[in-house]
Amino acid sequence: MTEYVAPAAVEIVADQAKESASSYLRYFFRYGEIVEDFKNQREALELKKERVDTRVDEAKSQNELIHKDVDNWLTSAEKELKETQNLKDEIDRVKCFKWCPKWGWRYSLSKKLAEKIPIISKLLETSNFAQVGYCRPLQGIEFITSTDFMDSKSSKSAFNQIMEAINAKGVNMIGLHGMPGVGKTTLAKEVGKHAREQKLFDKVVMFTMSQNPNIRTIQDKIAEMFGLNFHTNTEEGRAEELFRSMKGMNKILVIVDNLWEEFKMESIGIPFGDEHEGCKILLTTRRQQVCTKMNCKEI
């Protein structure tokens, strides 16, 4: 029985065979060129990784946090350098048999090197980081020293009322008022500490107001806690930058201690109410009328 093979099928097989042979010859006869390219690219990656490592060490010495993409790049670069070290060693072994190299060995190594070159090249292209680190946001140092919380029924009751108000929908501002020395600040710190430890908010910040508050100083303190660097110099411009930064977080607790009179939080750059329903403000004051004027839920 005679089998008939269509001319088209023969042509396809011939093309595939030709392509396979061409690929083999390309890897074999361009071996020296491929090796040189590989060695140059790998050496460039080693040098680049050293420079990035140095910048990362400098950033860490300044107590900065390292950007995620920088960490990921270093991990990938380290992985490629380790993997290609074996290929580099294999190149040296091939040199030992240069008068009588095995064709299959040479082809196989050339192919492996050619496959690694674009990977290394891509790492080099993505290695130019404008910054490797950023300022570590402050965690609200005031809360760390809040160990003198009064373990009394009145304090517990007030604490529970505040936490209930903070978690209630539709309540944006809570006012804690009372005479000097009754423990308002201590209670507010304990609320902040609890909220942060329980991860009830994405960020908890606290600052103290004076009778003549310095807006720029307050803005600087909040910005530092958010890891924000201002690009404008006016109070209004800084307030807008702070506003945008805080809007980027879903839930924020802002504790304003020792407020003396009605104050517009927008002048600092704090969004709340319809502007940011996830931002809750807890303020302490010795004057009940301050709570009333600012439409607080009073505790």
Image: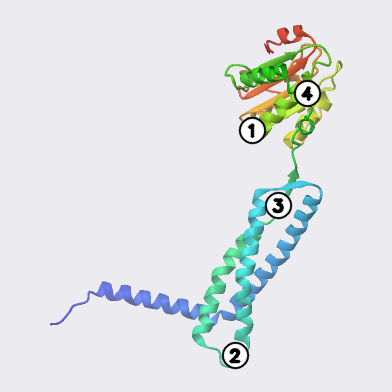
Q: Is residue 238 above or below residue 31?
A: above
**Residue type marked 2:** Phe
**Residue type marked 4:** Thr
Q: CA distance from mark 3 to mark 1?
A: 35 Å
Helix, strand or loop under label 1: loop
Residue 126 x %, y %: 64, 56
Residue 172 x %, y %: 64, 18
Q: CA distance from mark 3 to mark 4?
A: 44 Å
Helix, strand or loop under label 2: loop
| Residue ID for mark 3 | 129
Question: Depth-wise, is mark 1 or mark 2 nearer the camera?
Answer: 1
At horizontal 81% and vertical 13% (from top left) the residue drawn is 260
| Residue ID for mark 4 | 186
Q: Can you name the residue that lies furthest to the bottom here?
A: 99
Question: Depth-wise, is mark 3 or mark 4 nearer the camera?
Answer: 4
Work out whether residue 7 or residue 103 is closer to the camera in this orientation and state it.
103
Residue 130 x %, y %: 72, 49
- Decide if residue 154 is in sight here: yes
Q: CA distance from mark 1 to mark 2?
A: 66 Å
Number of numbered discs = 4
Work out whether residue 76 or residue 63 is closer to the camera in this orientation and state it.
63
Q: Which label's residue is closer to the chain start, 1 or 4?
A: 4
Residue 82 x %, y %: 63, 69
* Quarter of the view holding residue 218: top right
Helix, strand or loop under label 4: helix
Question: Depth-wise, is mark 3 or mark 1 nearer the camera?
Answer: 1
Please say if the residues under marks 3 and 1 sit with CB atoms less than 8 Å apart: no
Q: Residues within 10 Å of mark 2 (few under 14, many from 20)?
A: few
Q: Quadrant of the N terminus?
A: bottom left
Q: Which mark is residue 198?
A: 1
Q: Residues within 10 Å of mark 1 (few under 14, many from 20)?
A: few
| Residue ID for mark 2 | 97
